Amino acid sequence: MNNLLLSELISTRISHDLIGNIGAVANAVELMEDEDADFMSDIKDILKVSSQVLVSRLKFFRMAFGLDNANLEDMALVEKTTRDYLQSIGNKNFPIILKFDSCSQKFSRIMMLSVMILADLIVKGGEICVCEKDCKLFVNVSAISKISASKTEDILALLAGTKEEYLAQYAPAFFLKDLLGSSGLKLFLPDGDVLGFVIG
């Protein structure tokens, strides 16, 4: 994959993940212009929720896909940004929880991309666990989480190099593969149900 195609996939994915809440903000502004007091409470709720989602996602995307910067060295910020991102894509009834044990700064971007990839596979909430042991990063979906079988097959094929269909929804996986190359990345299914990465 060339850099131009990768950039196009990432741009398309980011735009897709932001457009819904941008549209919600635009609709709320239109309602405000009508000056109908009956809708003011709803408008405030829409603006509050949508702005929180947009801020959380933009901060995450900037760190995960942007140029290297000092924020990636602040692991407390990396953890918070990742946790906030997961909160923005889940819902209160089916949240995606981050269980963060440890991760050194050399793995910060890789961890964020791994979490994003796995979060895309989770159906109706779950838990993603992150820890570092013996100079290797482990990121996996807990056994209590239900994952999409078809998306999992796509990710396995993509990382194995047997899938050549370039879909924007898999931009994080393409970018992760590009960052790591062919060495140091292993995808595993330890119990047949749990999906995860070992990186080192």
Image: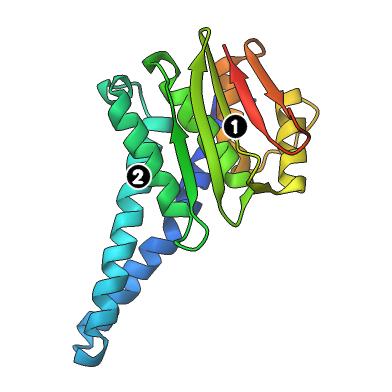
Q: Which residue is identified by label 2? A: 58
From the top left corner, tell me how far across and down residue 99 is, in percent. Answer: 46, 36
Q: Which amino acid does the dot numbered 2 rest on?
A: Leu
**Looking at this view, is 26 or 137 the one in front?**
137
- Quadrant for residue 49, please give it: bottom left
Q: Which amino acid does the dot numbered 1 rest on?
A: Asn
Q: How many angstroms separate mark 1 from mark 2 (CA)?
A: 24 Å
Q: Which residue is identified by label 1? A: 140
* As drawn, 24 above or below 6: below
From the top left corner, tell me how far across and down residue 172 is, in percent. Answer: 55, 35
Q: Are marks 1 and 2 in contact (CB under 8 Å)?
A: no
Instruction: Give me the residue at 60% from left, 37% from top.
Output: 141
Instruction: Give me the residue at 50% from left, 28% from top.
Output: 130
From the top left corner, tell me how far across and down residue 116 is, in percent. Answer: 52, 39
Nearest to N terminus: mark 1 or mark 2: 2
**Looking at this view, is 93 or 56 the one in front?**
93
